[in-house]
Image: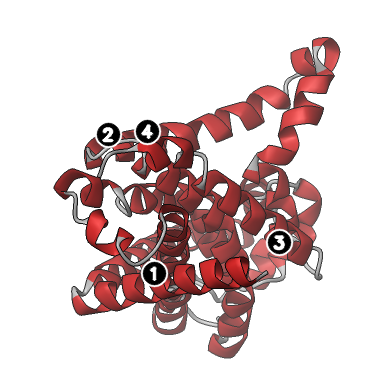
Amino acid sequence: MNAFLTSLRDALQVARFHVVRAVRTRTVVFLSAVYLLASAGVAWIFRGIVRELEKNAAELLRVPVTDTPGAMMDTLRGREELQSIVEALLPNPELADWALHLPVLTIAHFWMALGALPFLAAVIGAEVIAPGIKDRSLRFELVRTGRIELVLGRWMGQGALIAVATALSIVGPLIVGTFFMVQQPAWESAVVLAVMTPKLIAWSLPFLGLGVACSQLSGNTNFARIAALGATTLTWIAMGVFETDWIDEHAPWVADLLDPLLPQTYMTALWGPGSDWLMSAGILLGLGLVFALLGFPLFARRNL
């Protein structure tokens, strides 16, 4: 028990040092800016989609077209165009009625995050250890702690930075909805986005773990990034393959065996209302920890 507590304390110290270093080098500022610009860009694109939908609806209903989108959201909720878009964004079309009653930009923000965060987190994770392998600077940290504590500490520290960037990214859709649309209550949008944030943080952790695992394979950061992107892409391909009729007919045991290992299996629970997402978030946290250690057998034997 004492050994476990000592190991945990060391990992937390490594995580703290990783965060402090990111603040000192302003890496956290760059990371937050990337997340914020991405969320604002998607919100602006979705604003344009809403504007076009409202324009078409106004022409059909023979009512004046508003310059600022958002005024006809109640009308759009009853039309097939917006419903079909929302159903396409949702992993489960049965959640469309729930999603349509949320502020419209919050849907776009969550959709963007589910698609983009896995790749961002994987690339970010790929840079956690590989540079230290290349310049052999890791040996100075390893004088004070073990290799597994180093890996887990870096994973936790980078996860904390991603959590900060994810939380700050909600400012993008809030600004677009409040100042460039109408009838988009800022307080309601802020509450919905705040509730979504811990779900998105949990969603990032397995893919961050894949990046950290790839970061342990080589001192070449570009190779680690490519490997992390490839591993992330494979999870999406596997999800599609497991949902095919051929798998259902010929090898259903493959899906039953491997589905629990795919983060995408728990994506629907993150979308829906209620507290079911907490269990999925716990599983995603566990997968992130397991994935981060996939590269450890090689890293443990590496000559640093």
Task: Say if 89 sits above or below 170 in the image.
Answer: above
Question: Marks 1 and 4: CB-CB under 8 Å?
Answer: no
Q: Residue 211, can we see it?
A: yes
The residue lying at 42 percent from left, 46 percent from top is 211
> In which quadrant is the C terminus drawn?
top left
Question: Marks 4 and 2: CB-CB under 8 Å?
Answer: yes
The residue lying at 34 percent from left, 47 percent from top is 126
- Upstream in sequence: badge 3 or badge 2: 2
Place of residue 17 in the rendered image (x, y in percent of width and height, measured from the top left): 33, 74
Please tell me the numbered disc located at residue 282.
3
Please tell me the numbered disc located at residue 227.
4
Mark 3 vs mark 4, CA separation in Å: 26 Å
- Upstream in sequence: badge 1 or badge 4: 1
The residue lying at 50 percent from left, 81 percent from top is 182
Amino acid type at circle 4 is: Ala
Residue identifier under label 2: 223
Amino acid type at circle 3 is: Gly
Residue identifier under label 1: 14
Amino acid type at circle 1 is: Val
Mark 2 vs mark 1, CA separation in Å: 24 Å
